[in-house]
Image (tube, rainbow, N blue to C red):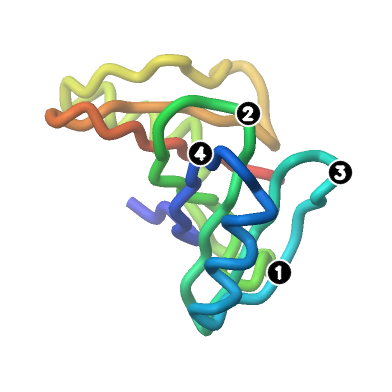
Amino acid sequence: MKLGAFSLSLSVKDINASKQFYEHLGFVVFGGSMDKNYLIMKNEHTLIGLFQGMFEGNILTFNPGWDENATNLEAFDDVRAIQRQLKNKGIAVNPEADENTSGPASIMVTDPDGNVLLIDQHR
């Protein structure tokens, strides 16, 4: 199963304070917008997303079809194929992607400890 680029999506209280903190750790802004209350930050191959007021808790995020530079990958597993594999293994998917569509879609699963995984395909 090819899940694509990995990042940790952090729910932050103050995006400015969080941005400054992660800059001190060597992260630089890679994407997003302060005006939209989210930033994607990068340090070498490590990606984190800072999201203010968008969701509760932190989320493990995977982007099928992208590498850590948001460059399109030639070969990748479509999120709907990943969804089928997970469901065949008895893993609950909520929300699910519409199997009758193609292109961008996302699904979420929760691990046994309550950690949320977002599999978010952008293409």
Between discs 1 and 4, the one toward the N terminus: 4
Residue lying furthest left:
112
Q: Residue at x 69, y 36 (%)?
A: 103
- Residue beneath label 3, please? 35
The tag earlier along the polypeptide, 1 or 2, is 1
Q: Nearer the viewer, residue 5 or 1?
A: 5
Residue 50, position as x, y percentages in the image: 59, 50
Q: Identify the residue at horizontal 41%, vertical 39% (top origin).
A: 59
Residue at (46% x, 46% y) in the render: 61
Q: Are marks 2 and 4 in contact (CB under 8 Å)?
A: no
Q: Which residue is mark 1?
A: 29
Which amino acid lies under the numbered mark 1 shown in the image of this protein? Answer: Val
Label 2's element? Answer: loop
Between 111 and 23, the one lying in front of the other is 23
Dot label at residue 53: 2
At numbered mark 1, what does the secondary structure look like: helix, strand or loop? strand
Quadrant housing residue 19: bottom right
| Number of numbered labels in the structure image | 4
From the top left corner, tell me how far across and down residue 42 is, in percent. 58, 72
> In the picture shown, does residue 25 fall above or below 80?
below
Find out whether the residues at labels 1 and 2 contact each other: C-beta distance under 8 Å. Answer: no
| Mark 2 vs mark 4, CA separation in Å | 7 Å
Q: Quadrant of residue 91?
A: top left
Residues at circles 1 and 3 in contact by the CB criterion of under 8 Å = no
Q: Secondary structure at mark 4?
A: strand
